[in-house]
Image (cartoon, grey):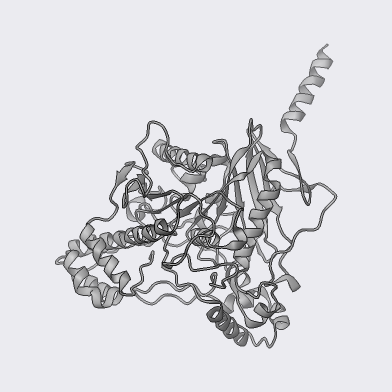
Amino acid sequence: MVHAFALLAAALATAASAAPRVELDSGAIEGKADHDLNVFLGIPYAKPPVGELRWRAPEPLPHWTAVRPTTSFSASCYQTEGKPFGPFTREFVEVGRRSEDCLYLNVWAPAKPAKALPVLVFIHGGGFGSGSTAVPVYTGAGLARRGVIVVTINYRLGAFGFLAHPALTAESPLKSSGNYGILDMIAALRWVKANIAQFGGDPQNVTISGQSAGAAAVSDLLVSPQAKGLFARTIIQSGPGLGVNMLTLDQAEQTGLDVARKLNAQSIAQLRAVASDAIVAATASPPPSKNAVPRILMAPNLDGKIVAMNPESADGRAVSDVPVMAGFNKDEAFIFGVPHVTPDAFVEYVKTRYGNFTDRFLALYPHATTEEASRSMDEMGRDRYMAQLILWAERHVAAEQQPLYLYQFDHSYPGLDAKRFGAFHTAEVPYVLGALDIAGIPFTDTDHQVSRQMEDRWVAFMTGGDPNVPDTPHWTSWREGPGKIMHLGDNPGISWPVSDKTRLDVFRAYVAAGGQLSLF
């Protein structure tokens, strides 16, 4: 009898710890059990884009026969090594090993779903030149434990993802080049559509979300005919109306020609043979000049095929008219902390940035003392990107029918110097994904409460396209309350986001006169 019980116990233990397996279109994979989750890391979704496949659209995988282990992150897409800076400590920049063979994704799924679950496909940020699903703040287990499926994806970066060239355009079936990173995202979404039911997900209930460059990519996917039908909702985190100037295909091709000359490559065959490191060195973005908007050398271009129109322009009508949730963090503007500036320095900053509108802005932002100038620098930065959000929202709702919900996240991340950096760019990501078990970060009960608040809102939106949750402040859509946004974090509630409506009028006039607003 004792022997029988021992055998039964051993059998139950084996069953409880059995690695989960899933049969995909391309073959079987085996992940790992994490208590109540099944986790699959490093699932390939396209052929490695190397050799002759460098600068080509992602190609389907061949079928494999043996069970493929998917228990660790793949290599990150090729980029320079990420190093901490400003508030971005290792958990925001650590990408691990790098390779051009990087088209892989990860899935966190509840182990025993009672029904088909909503799916979040998250696209990481990094200025289109850095980042990875291996970055610790992008771990999806916490959010998945709320009863949803989380997918994170790698996509080609920098020149590997966004180099355009006339010869590449000529060889493309779409007669386009330079949007390979966007094509990677579309390929990953097609993979989700075809396979996510095997993990317990609902392929008709997919939300795409991205932060920073990932948010800009979500905007690009909204206007992409190639992505139509692949998602039901979108969440744009720190990205609507980023102020990044999108090049036309012709302009992007000229940049590609300059890169080829710099590398002494006379043909695409020669360019494909250049070492990865040499390409990265030849296409590194130049450091920004004082008070200038950072320049991103390699980014999606307006080719009319993959990115059908500029999503930030007045005619940027979405091809996919779906519910949208979008917002910024409270302290986005100064990733190195709010500066202490003298009155003269503040005046010089405003002159450099706003030109002919200098006097109008100076009249609205007190700057007689260093204290006033520093406070106005902070307020002007925040007003700038919140005005940008409002102007973008007005254009969006004028063209689309589906609901739009806007937010500002205001909780300080307890990292290097919470008082100095506050709710900085990217700070909301670990709260959304529930990644609050990062070693060395002193997360408190308050942090976990904020994370629960964010997860509640995200799950509600993913489930039904409405972020409202019982027993919480009502989040009005833009059409219900034009100009009002939801504050998420320490003091949730609806309010007007710009410190003074007169200031919004000046930002509006500045943009109408051809001025450009940007996040930084």
The residue shown at (36%, 38%) is 474
* 77 sits left or right of 300 in the view: right
Query: Residue pushed farthest top?
Result: 1
Using the image, determine if residue 394 lies above or below residue 36. below
Residue 493 can be seen in this image: yes
Using the image, determine if residue 483 lies above or below residue 225. above
Quadrant in the picture for the N terminus? top right
Residue 370 can be seen in this image: no
* 280 sits left or right of 172 in the view: left
Residue 448 x, y percent position in the rendering: 44, 38
Using the image, determine if residue 152 lies above or below residue 338. above
Splitting the image into 4 quarters, where does residue 332 fall? bottom left
Splitting the image into 4 quarters, where does residue 187 fall? bottom right
Splitting the image into 4 quarters, where does residue 109 fall? top right
Residue 341 x, y percent position in the rendering: 24, 67
Residue 78 x, y percent position in the rendering: 63, 67
Question: 303 or 199, which is in the foreground?
Answer: 303
The residue shown at (43%, 57%) is 238
Query: Residue pushed farthest right?
Result: 65
